[in-house]
Amino acid sequence: MIYIGYKTLTSKTEVDVDINSSKATSIASFRTGFLTNVLNPKTTLFVVSIFTQIVSPFTDIELQIGYGLFMSLMHLIWFIGVATFFSHHKLRTIMLEKQAIFNRIIGIILMGLGVSLGVIPITN
């Protein structure tokens, strides 16, 4: 995390997004977003870590299905909200203009999390 934070903090790359000239269709955009999330190992690890805390071999199958449906619905609501929020023209413009500042803030946070993982003792 410290390395990723450092690389983010010192990154000089600026993203240039011109949404108006994009020829991507809604279906292509949905497919890209869906595959990005499905193939992201962090998503799988998150869901598995949550389920291993609350689901045991003795948990009823109906409850397990309910947990799965709930998690799927919450992910759907979250990603619809994120897509709606970040597709707003004014917010997108502000984020692109201030991306260097955001990168520095995120880099510092990631480095801090990395240091805290190395310093804070793990207790049971």
Image (tube, grey):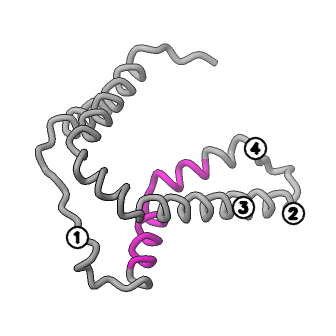
Q: Position of residue 97 (x, y in %)?
A: 22, 50
Rounded to the nearest angstrom, the CA distance separating label 2 from label 3 is 10 Å
Q: Is mark 4 on a helix, strand or loop?
A: helix
> Is residue 32 shown above or below 54?
below
Q: Residue 71 occupies which quadrant of the picture?
A: bottom right
Q: Residue 18 carries which label?
A: 1
* Badge 1 element: loop
- At 42% from the left edge and 59% from the top edge, which residue is drawn? 86
- How many residues crowd around disc 4 within 10 Å: few (fewer than 14), some, or many (20 or more)? few
On whether residue 36 falls in the magenta region, the answer is yes
Across and down, in percent, residue 23 comes to 27, 85
* Residue for point 46% across, 51% down: 42
Front label number (2 vs 1): 1
Q: How crowded is mark 3: few (under 14 residues within 10 Å), some or many (20 or more)?
A: some
Tell me the distance, in whole angstroms, between the alpha carbons under discs 3 and 1.
Answer: 37 Å
The extreme front residue here reads 90
**How far across and how far down the image is residue 51, in percent?**
69, 49
Q: Of helix, strand and loop, which mostly describes the magenta segment?
A: helix
Query: Is the C-beta separation of discs 3 and 4 under 8 Å?
Result: no
In-front residue for pair 24/40: 24
Task: Give, as a single range, the part of the protein colored magenta.
Answer: 29-48
The residue where tag 3 is placed is 68
Where disc 3 sits, the SS reads: helix
Give the numbered dot on residue 54: 4
